[in-house]
């Protein structure tokens, strides 16, 4: 059983690989990203019929359509565990309609209260099953270190997804001082015998670049294998096993809106996605390619508007672009990894062209796409950016008008949707529970400028206590349990390291040595 095969965006892999191999490899040799050779097509009837199934079965049906090389009964069993009572709503990702044409897709009902759970409750299951299958086939003999660079949400979601998984350990790096109190505590208190967390000096791009450099260090890889029987892999959004689960909720949401009588089967639905690494919106693109009647895809940026400028001009330029801190930190990035897959698709799968643009980006910190690719991009994507003050004003306005509390990332998307929308109804993608970003929600509700100090008594509160206060003020008492209990948990991880390759590698080795000592003791 080989199933649908995977090729890479830079054309460096001469042999296509299977799904299980693509999941285990993460990044392709040569630095490209894996994409499936065939993109399956669904009929409108197929899509509509999904609404009769629970979410776990919708996911399994989609993976069957992708023809992944795992047995069907295993896929079913894995999805039951990935999308079960680890989510606090049996619909997994319910849709709240604010009016007849604005539907909010809530992707934050998982264990860490952010949308990364949608993929990261699933990927580790794929990962373990893939490793087991490859071991049975004699293609694998080592264990894995998952190394993750996070701007906040991914790290916790990956830790939670991989905790105590068989044959896998996980190390997470976040920008020291660049995540919220809640995000910090979520990671620093992480349970599990196979986990480690490091603060890294620098911003998220420094973290991500550091991780990429470690992945590119062949000597280090050889040393890990020889001395520890470990290979590196990635749970970042470049792993196809993380991207594919995100396609599911677009197909599923469309089916659900039709079943709920909010959309006619075949009617167009526009989608607005708060975008950082381009994984979430890329999943919407694949859903559209598969036959879901999505109209325009709105790419919503915060003040780090590199993607907005790119979609508007065709030039991706970070040569003189400052990195701005915003109320929506998970979108604070300059190098948007998954854009490479999008460009591969829009260029007619021209790997040589992609390799050229990516090398321009590395060397000149900029690239420009050709006219044809640009025109194709404009057929599907529009984009707008939302400044920090408008983001907070939007949270207040939506609360006043709809009695609904948005987190700052979702507020960026809501506002961008307002600016960009046409005739079609819009699915606004909500990527975090508001309580993950309580400080800025408080600013929003109290008319405090972004970045301005909170009143002293409020600033003295922990993230949890601040959320309690907001809950009292707004009547929104639906605080997720994982967030409410954070102050009671002990801090396990306090290390802060530099972002250079050797510092990160050193930290990884110390982690492995500690584990080896534990096992021999
Ligand atoms: C990761 C994240 C995003 C950005 O998603 P991408 O797939 O990287 O574009 C937006 N909002 C939140 C809350 C996130 O955690």
Image (cartoon, helix red, strand yellow):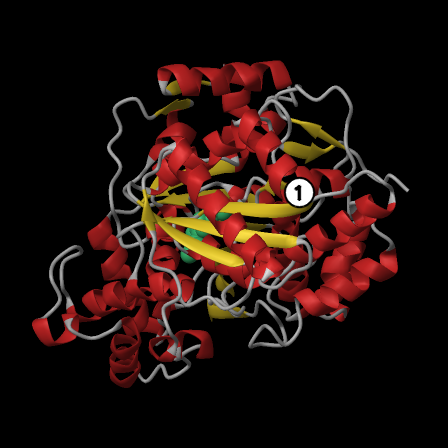
Task: Using the image, determine if residue 188 lies above or below residue 89.
Answer: above
Is residue 116 at all visible to an observer of this figure? no
Place of residue 19 in the rendered image (x, y in percent of width and height, measured from the top left): 76, 41
Instruction: Identify the residue under disc 1.
Output: 229
- Left or right of 116 in this view: 300: left
Look at 54% across and 63% down and name the residue there: 160
Q: Secondary structure at mark 1?
A: loop
- Left or right of 92 in this view: 81: right
Front-lying residue, 345 or 415: 345
Task: Using the image, determine if residue 491 lies above or below residue 378.
Answer: below
- Left or right of 473 in this view: 362: right
Look at 65% across and 58% down and name the residue there: 122
Front-lying residue, 421 or 451: 451
Q: Quadrant of the C terminus?
A: bottom right
Look at 16% across and 55% down and name the residue there: 451
Place of residue 113 in the rendered image (x, y in percent of width and height, measured from the top left): 46, 67
Task: Using the image, determine if residue 47 lies above or below residue 97.
Answer: above
Image quarter of residue 345: top right
For this orientation, the residue located farthest to the front is 521
């Amino acid at each position: 059983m080989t199933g649908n095969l995977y090729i890479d965006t830079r054309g460096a892999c001469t042999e296509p690989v299977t799904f299980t191999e693509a999941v285990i490899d993460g990044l392709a040799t040569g630095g490209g990203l894996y994409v499936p050779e065939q993109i399956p097509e669904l009929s409108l009837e197929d899509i509509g019929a999904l609404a009769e199934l629970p979410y776990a079965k919708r996911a399994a049906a989609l993976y069957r359509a992708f023809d992944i090389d795992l047995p069907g009964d295993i896929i079913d069993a894995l999805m039951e565990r990935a999308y079960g009572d680890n989510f606090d709503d049996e619909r997994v990702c319910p849709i709240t309609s604010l009016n007849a044409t604005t539907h909010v897709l809530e992707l934050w009902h998982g264990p860490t209260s952010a949308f990364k759970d949608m993929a990261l409750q699933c990927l580790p299951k794929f990962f373990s099953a893939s490793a087991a299958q490859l071991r049975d086939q004699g293609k694998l003999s080592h264990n894995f270190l998952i190394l993750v660079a996070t701007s906040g949400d991914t790290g916790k979601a990956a830790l939670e997804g991989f905790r105590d998984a068989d044959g896998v350990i996980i190390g997470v790096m976040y920008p020291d001082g660049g995540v919220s109190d809640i995000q910090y505590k979520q990671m620093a208190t992480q349970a599990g015998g196979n986990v480690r967390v490091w603060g890294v000096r620098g911003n998220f791009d420094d973290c991500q670049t550091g991780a990429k450099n470690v992945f590119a260090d062949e000597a280090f890889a050889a040393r890990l294998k020889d001395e520890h029987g470990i290979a590196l892999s990635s749970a970042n959004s470049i792993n196809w096993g993380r991207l594919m689960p995100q396609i599911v909720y677009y197909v599923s949401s469309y089916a659900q809106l039709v079943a709920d009588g909010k959309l006619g089967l075949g009617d167009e639905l526009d989608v607005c996605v708060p975008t950082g690494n381009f994984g979430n919106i890329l999943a919407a693109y694949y859903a559209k390619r598969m036959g879901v009647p999505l109209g325009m895809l709105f790419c919503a940026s915060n003040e780090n508007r590199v993607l907005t400028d790119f979609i508007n001009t065709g030039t991706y330029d970070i040569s003189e672009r400052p990195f701005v801190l915003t109320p929506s930190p998970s979108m604070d990035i300059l190098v948007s990894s998954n854009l490479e897959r999008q460009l591969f698709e829009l260029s007619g799968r021209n790997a040589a062209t992609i390799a050229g643009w990516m090398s321009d980006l590395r060397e000149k910190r900029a690239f420009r796409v050709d006219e044809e690719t640009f025109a194709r991009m404009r057929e599907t994507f529009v984009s707008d950016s939302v400044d920090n003050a408008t983001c907070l004003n939007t949270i207040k306005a939506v609360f006043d008008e709809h009695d609904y509390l948005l987190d700052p990332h979702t507020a960026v998307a809501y506002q961008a949707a307002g600016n960009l929308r046409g005739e079609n109804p819009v699915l606004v993608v909500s990527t975090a529970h508001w309580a993950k970003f309580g400080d800025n929600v408080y600013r929003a509700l109290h008319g405090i400028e972004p970045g301005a100090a909170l009143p002293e008594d409020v600033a003295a509160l922990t993230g949890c206590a601040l959320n309690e206060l907001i809950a009292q003020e707004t009547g929104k008492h639906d605080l997720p349990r994982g967030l409410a209990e954070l102050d009671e948990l002990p801090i396990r991880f306090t290390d802060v390291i530099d972002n250079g390759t050797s510092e990160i590698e050193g930290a990884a080795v110390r982690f492995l040595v500690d584990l080896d000592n534990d096992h021999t003791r």
